[in-house]
């Protein structure tokens, strides 16, 4: 059992296990499931993630409100033009994150990871690293358990809700989960996973939640696109051996304190940030 990053690290060291293995053992015990049953269950989660991350790449998915959509396809087409600034990997990762966000805004099926608003980040990061290193589906499933372990620590000690902590708690948490997972998938150790998660949260500390018209569309989809890149760059920083000056648990605590200090107008009320701009207000009137 673990409640903090420190406890998770100690458990991994004591048992000589990866984060995913510790989480899998705990889940088997908690849910009274065999290893195969648990893997089969997570495979269903992965299948839904894969579908949502790809379905917006070759056809436009428009939101129920008609406020947004079609951007995953736009970005995928742009990537395929071969004339991007950031290259294929980054643009492909962003397109997949946008795709899941668009599926969510069109009331399609996604996996909240940790929330629906931030659901594009974990799938896209895992797919990107799987493709980059030619990994297996089993590696991705293990990555999901690692992501789950990190998300659980953030939820236990802080929050994963935009209404409580701003977007740093939603997209920030998703990036931290994804960063830790892809470090493990790429062969990094437990310390590197926790460092990557710390970087991802630190990079977006203070990020407000300001959905235009109160809909989880804009700037949510954009923050899924930037969130997956945050996860990937945080993972690379950690894999290079760079360490977080502040331990993961303290970063989580700091994120929570920042969330508490945020005014209500910046916590999913659509009363601040880009939601409260004249154009944001105009969209709100139109939608309502
Ligand atoms: S802006 Fe708010 S609603 Fe949108 S993804 Fe971030 S936390 Fe969720």
Image: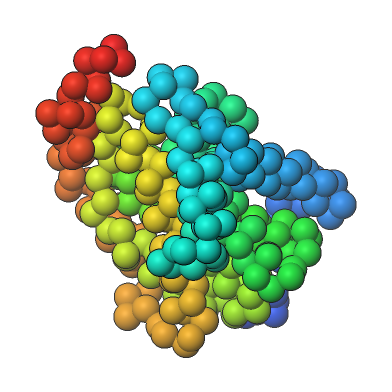
In the image, is 165 to the left or to the right of 61? left
List x then y, in percent, for residue 95: 51, 50
Q: Left or right of 180: which side holds 86? A: left
The residue at 52%/81% (across/down) is 239
Nearer to us in this view, 58 or 83? 83
The residue located at (54%, 24%) in the rendering is 107
Q: Is residue 143 visible?
A: yes
Q: Residue 230 falls in which quadrant of the image?
A: bottom left
Q: Is residue 23 above or below residue 224?
A: below
**Residue at x 37% of width, y 74% of height:** 247
Give the left or right position of residue 43, taking residue 226 as reference.
Answer: right
Percent across and percent down for residue 143 are 65, 61
**For residue 264, side relative to residue 95 (left or right):** left
Q: Quadrant of the N terminus?
A: bottom right
Q: Residue at the spot x=31%, y=59% of the render?
A: 204
Q: Where residue 33 appears, x then y in whole percent? A: 82, 46
Residue 157 visible in the displayed image:
no
């Amino acid at each position: 059992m673990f409640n903090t990053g420190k406890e998770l690290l100690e458990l991994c060291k004591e048992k000589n296990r990866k984060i995913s293995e510790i989480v899998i053992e705990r889940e088997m015990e908690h849910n009274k499931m065999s290893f195969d049953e648990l893997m089969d269950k997570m495979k269903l989660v992965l299948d839904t993630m894969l579908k949502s991350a790809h379905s917006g790449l070759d056809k436009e998915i428009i939101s129920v409100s008609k406020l947004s959509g079609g951007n995953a396809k736009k970005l995928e087409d742009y990537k395929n033009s071969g004339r991007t600034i950031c290259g294929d990997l980054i643009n492909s990762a962003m397109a997949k994150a946008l795709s899941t966000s668009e599926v969510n805004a069109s009331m399609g099926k996604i996996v909240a990871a940790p929330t629906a608003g931030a659901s594009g980040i974990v799938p896209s990061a895992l797919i990107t690293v799987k493709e980059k290193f030619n990994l297996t589906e089993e590696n991705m499933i293990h990555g999901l358990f690692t992501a789950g372990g990190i998300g659980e620590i953030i939820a236990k000690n802080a929050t994963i809700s935009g209404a409580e902590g701003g977007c740093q708690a939603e997209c920030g948490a998703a990036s931290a989960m994804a960063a830790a997972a892809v470090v493990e998938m790429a062969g990094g150790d437990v310390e590197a996973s926790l460092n990557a998660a710390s970087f991802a949260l630190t990079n977006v500390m203070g990020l407000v939640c300001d959905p235009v018209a109160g809909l989880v569309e804009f700037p949510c989809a954009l923050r899924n696109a930037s969130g997956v890149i945050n996860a990937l760059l945080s993972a690379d920083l950690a894999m290079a051996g760079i360490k977080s000056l502040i331990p993961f648990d303290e970063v989580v605590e700091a994120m929570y304190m920042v969330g508490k200090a945020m005014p209500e107008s910046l916590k999913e009320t659509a009363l601040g940030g880009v939601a409260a701009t004249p154009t944001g207000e105009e969209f709100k009137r139109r939608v309502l």
